Image: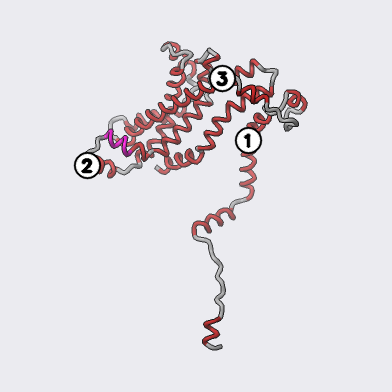
């Protein structure tokens, strides 16, 4: 074969191989047992089915629910949702839940960051015991302490008030907050603090200018968890609040169900509207929660 033929011969096209990380991800997906996906979808279905039943139940009439409790709407009845949304009591209870949730979140974030900073960065006698005390708080849910807590709130004159709900919720949310935030703050290099001190920054200045921005993933995580827990809280408001105008939405659902027990479709509409805000809020910040918890474990 002549040299010109060799030069003009077409070069065989080489298959383009995916890059390393993408190829490893594809191989990882190929090795996953299909039963894992089956089990995962079953678990997702078990979680979504009750929510879907409540939402769709609000779009049915009482006669449809009585005839076929587990069926789909034959005619879509949006009037149930319209009646609830035009009710002033629903929006009043929605506002109560929003105010209590935001106040609880603010208190948990502010106090949690300050306490976690001290436990993570300072050496002092009893630090380990204090951290263990906060960790032990995870083993005592609010339902266990509801009776002495009720007596304390009544003695302080906080019955049927926002502080009577917010302060205990902050106290019971702080253990989880500190357990999550301490690894974040402990992972901040000491060299950064020394450089800030050389530049003339005080401890408070270092905390505000450096620590708070660097701990944003953990702060967002604990804030979301605190807000959702406050929004769904039922036991504490049940003991503290005794006026329907001051009810939160979980208590409002119970009161509405007792008042309109015959109107099942309307009760389902009220229930779905009361839980949808928390579901939307949690879904929007799901990645932030996972990222924050991952950072806490790595720290």
- Mark 3–mark 1 Cα distance, whole angstroms, equals 23 Å
Which quadrant of the view contains residue 195?
top left
**Which percent across, then down, holds residue 18?**
53, 61
Instruction: Name which of mark 2 and mark 3 comes first in the sequence.
Output: 2
Q: Give the residue number, with chain letter if any, for mark 1.
A: 48
Depicted 199 relative to depicted 224: above or below: below
Give the residue number, with chain letter if any, for mark 2.
198
Please state, as top left, top right, bottom left or bottom right, where the C terminus lies in the image.
Answer: top left
Q: How many marks?
A: 3
As drawn, which residue projects farthest toward the right?
67
Label number found at residue 251 = 3
Which stretch did the figure color magenta? 203-210
Q: Mark 2 packing: few (<14 Cα in 10 Å), some, or many (20+)?
A: few
Q: Is residue 273 magenta?
A: no
**Horizontal placement of 60 versus 102: left or right?**
right
> What percent of the width, then of the height, locates residue 184?
38, 39
Residue placed most toward the observer, 207 or 284 = 284
Dot placed on the residue nearer the N-terminal end, 2 or 1: 1
As helix, strand or loop, the secondary structure at mark 1 comes to helix
Classify mark 2: helix, strand or loop: helix
Task: State the residue at coordinates (69%, 22%).
Answer: 264
Instruction: For the N terminus, give its image quadrant.
Output: bottom right
Disc assigned to residue 270: none
């Amino acid at each position: 074969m002549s040299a010109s033929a060799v030069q003009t011969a077409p070069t065989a096209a080489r298959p383009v191989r995916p890059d390393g990380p993408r190829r490893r991800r594809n191989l990882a997906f190929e090795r996953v047992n299909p039963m894992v996906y089956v089990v995962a979808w079953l678990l997702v279905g078990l979680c979504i089915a009750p929510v879907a039943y409540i939402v769709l139940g609000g779009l049915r009439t009482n006669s449809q629910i009585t005839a076929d409790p587990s069926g789909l709407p034959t005619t879509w009845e949006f009037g149930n949702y319209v009646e609830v949304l035009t009710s002033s009591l629903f929006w009043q209870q929605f506002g109560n839940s929003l105010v209590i949730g935001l106040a609880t979140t603010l208190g948990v974030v502010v106090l949690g960051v300050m306490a976690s900073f001290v436990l993570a960065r300072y050496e002092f006698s009893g630090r380990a015991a204090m951290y263990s005390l906060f960790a032990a708080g995870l083993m005592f849910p609010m339902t266990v302490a509801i009776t002495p807590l009720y007596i304390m709130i009544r003695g302080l004159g906080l019955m049927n008030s926002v502080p009577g709900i917010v302060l205990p919720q902050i106290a019971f949310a702080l253990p989880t907050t500190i357990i999550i935030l301490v690894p974040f703050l402990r992972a901040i290099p000491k060299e950064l603090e020394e450089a800030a001190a050389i530049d003339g920054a005080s401890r408070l200045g270092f905390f505000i200018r450096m620590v708070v921005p660097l701990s944003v993933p953990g702060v967002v995580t604990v804030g979301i968890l605190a807000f959702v827990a406050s929004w769904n809280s039922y036991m504490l408001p049940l003991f503290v609040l005794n006026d329907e105008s001051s009810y939160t939405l979980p208590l409002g659902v119970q009161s509405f169900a007792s008042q309109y027990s015959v109107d099942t479709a309307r009760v389902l509409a009220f229930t779905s509207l009361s839980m949808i805000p928390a579901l939307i809020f949690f879904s929007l910040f799901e990645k932030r929660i996972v990222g924050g918890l991952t950072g806490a474990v790595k720290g």
